[in-house]
Image (cartoon, helix red, strand yellow):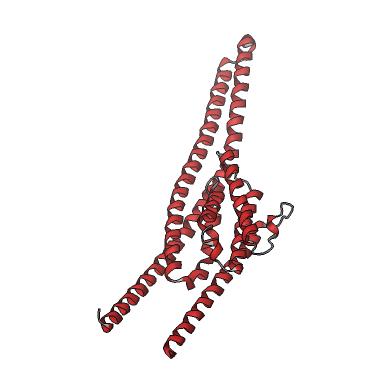
Amino acid sequence: MTPSLAQLAELVRQAEAKTRARKIEAETRQAAEHFREAEARSRQALERMRNARPASSRALEQADSDEQLLKDLVRKLAQFKSSLSSDADAEQLIATSQAEIERIRKEARTELEAATRELEECRRELRTAVDAYRQLRRELERLQPELVEAFAAEDRLLWDAESHFPGGQLQLLAHEVEAGLNAYPHLAKLEQYARLKVWIGRFRYHQAGPDRESENAEEIQTLAHKVFHQLKWLSRQYEPGYIEAFRQDFSTDWAAYVAEAQDQLVHAMETQRLARARREDEAEEAAAEA
């Protein structure tokens, strides 16, 4: 390949990369908007379920209690039937009571089924939106790392979104830690510190608000044990700095703690990106002078 042809090929490659980067940026912003909307709908559905479940349970328990009382009253009526002034009135009241009990029971079950169906549909939509955003977000970070900070709010929302799924937040954290183990030693100390602070903060957030809906409590407990020991090992192995969240007697507003740590992580990543860009510029200048 001639030098001019090689230069032309490089120009084409750069143009393709910029076009792809712009396309990915637009797609990521669109996916982020869809993700935010899906998270809001799922949050509303989850709130409806949290209200519907106890209300429906109380209504069903009351219906069962009223039905038992009705049976007892019917038995007593049979014993004292001769003393009734009107059989028709008693029979009408029995039929009306039965109808009211069935109506209450049906309404409670209908509300609970509707809330369950809505939550399942919203969770499916949210999972699709989360996966789409996360995939595009990774590609965007590879092509345009300078845009990391622009999506910081959506990155935080990813953690909140996982709370819509039983055990979701801890599973997401476990995946992130596992995926980041190999890269962690190569990070700058500032980024190591911030990333570990985010991870242990998320872990303590999970501890402070256990997922009561999880049907796999033993499995979640085993996973939590594994994640904590991985984080403790990273802290001891690389000593990025003192992090108070590793102390079990330390407590705080964990949501605010994680948000602060994420801001520190974004700042650390941006600092490293600028440092790399500066080194590349210096290398180019040195090569040009040579």
**Residue at (52% x, 28% y) in the render:** 102
Q: Residue furthest bottom?
A: 289
Quarter the C terminus occupies? bottom left
Assign the N terminus to one quadrant of the image.
bottom left
Which residue is nearer to you in this view: 260 or 69? Answer: 260
Q: In this picture, is 201 found above or below 4?
A: above
The image quarter in which residue 192 lies: bottom right
- Can you give x and y, in whole percent of width and height, for residue 101 in the image? 56, 28
Of the pair 233 and 26, the residue shown nearer to us: 233
When the figure is inspected, residue 56 is found, relative to residue 38, above or below; the finding is: above
Outermost right residue: 249
Tally of marks:
0
The residue lying furthest to the front in this view is: 290
Q: Is residue 43 visible?
A: no
Residue 12 falls left or right of residue 146: left
Q: Residue at x 61, y 68 (%)?
A: 189
Between 88 and 25, the one lying in front of the other is: 25
- Please give the name of the residue rendered at 51% of the width and 33% of the height, measured from the top-left corner: 106
Left or right side of 227 for 27: left
Residue 130 lies, in percent from the top left, at 46, 56
* Whether residue 78 is visible: yes
- Residue 174 sits above or below residue 264 on the image: above
Q: In the drawing, does residue 112 fall left or right of residue 68? A: left
Question: Residue 72's x, y, as percent?
Answer: 63, 17
Image x and y of residue 5, in percent: 26, 81
- At 32% from the left and 75% from the top, the residue drawn is 13
